[in-house]
Image (cartoon, rainbow, N blue to C red):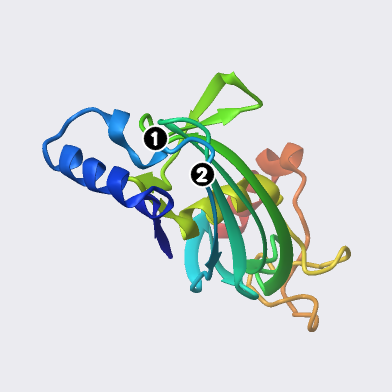
């Protein structure tokens, strides 16, 4: 879902902004020129398939949620939201699907002109990808928050046995007949010599 930030400005300012944007003028006539204006938008999120550190996962929003938009000055916007999502991930050992519930609290102070979010205080900023041409991409905002909240790896259960390194069988569901012996690397030279004699 995308929110047009023109919606939180007065009609007169919106008209000026559209005119100046078309002529590539400065950002001073933007949507954010109505300082202190606040608006609540009910948002929804479609199922999103994304990649996290090489892991493919599916993110689903459990229910509609409210996003509060408040302009601070002509360049700065405050975004707040509470959203609950479910995430289909893969167990780091057996690769089976693990459904995780995440409750996210989003608080962002954004410089729309520079496409930066303030970190902790105004002295530090971080580049963002969820603002484009005065449009807020809600899905990207949620994903950006989610990536900072979830752990790198996840297990289907604490004592997950993983998969067989030889045949790939899920060892939580049964036992395969593969040789699970882990060779001692210090004995590798002797093993190579032994195998050479066997081939003769």
Residue at the spot 25% in from the left edge and 41% down from the top edge: 17
Q: Residue beneath label 2, please?
A: 37
Residue at the spot 31% in from the left edge and 43% down from the top edge: 13
Residue at the spot 71% in from the left edge and 76% down from the top edge: 170
Tag count: 2
Image quadrant occupied by the N terminus: bottom left
Q: Quadrant of residue 164?
A: bottom right
Q: Residue beneath label 1, please?
A: 33
Residue 161: x and y in percent read 81, 68
Residue 157: x and y in percent read 84, 68
Is 185 or 73 nearer to us in this picture? 73
Query: Dot 1: what SS?
Result: helix
Horizontally, residue 46 falls left or right of residue 149, namely left
Q: Is residue 166 above or below residue 51?
A: below
Q: CA distance from mark 2 to mark 1?
A: 9 Å
Residue 144 circle label: none
Q: Is residue 200 visible?
A: no
Task: Using a 10 Å C-alpha cutoff, classify the residue at mark 2 as few (fewer than 14 neighbours), some (14 to 19) or many (20 or more).
Answer: some
Query: Dot 2: what SS?
Result: loop
Q: Residue furthest front?
A: 12
Q: Is residue 76 above or below residue 155?
A: above
Residue at the spot 48% in from the left edge and 73% down from the top edge: 46
Horizontally, residue 68 falls left or right of residue 16, namely right
Q: Residue furthest left?
A: 23
Q: Quadrant of residue 188?
A: top right
Is 4 or 20 nearer to us in this picture? 20
Horizontally, residue 158 falls left or right of residue 152, namely right
């Amino acid at each position: 879902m995308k929110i047009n930030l023109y919606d939180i400005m007065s009609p007169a300012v919106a008209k000026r902004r559209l005119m100046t944007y078309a002529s590539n003028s400065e950002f001073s006539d933007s949507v954010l020129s109505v300082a202190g204006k606040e608006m609540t938008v009910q948002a929804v999120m479609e199922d999103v398939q994304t990649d996290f550190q090489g892991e493919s996962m599916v993110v689903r929003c459990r229910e509609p949620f409210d996003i509060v938009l408040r302009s601070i000055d002509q360049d700065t916007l405050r975004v707040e939201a509470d959203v609950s999502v479910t995430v289909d991930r893969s167990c780091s050992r057996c690769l089976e699907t693990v459904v995780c519930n995440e409750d996210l609290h989003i608080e962002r102070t954004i410089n729309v002109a520079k496409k930066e979010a303030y970190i902790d205080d105004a002295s530090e900023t971080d580049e963002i990808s969820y603002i484009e041409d005065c449009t807020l991409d809600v899905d990207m905002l949620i994903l950006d928050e989610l990536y900072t909240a979830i752990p790198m790896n996840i297990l289907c259960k604490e004592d997950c046995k993983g998969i067989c390194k030889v045949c790939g069988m899920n060892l939580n569901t049964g036992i395969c007949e593969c040789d699970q012996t882990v060779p001692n690397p210090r004995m590798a030279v002797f093993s190579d010599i032994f195998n050479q004699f066997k081939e003769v």
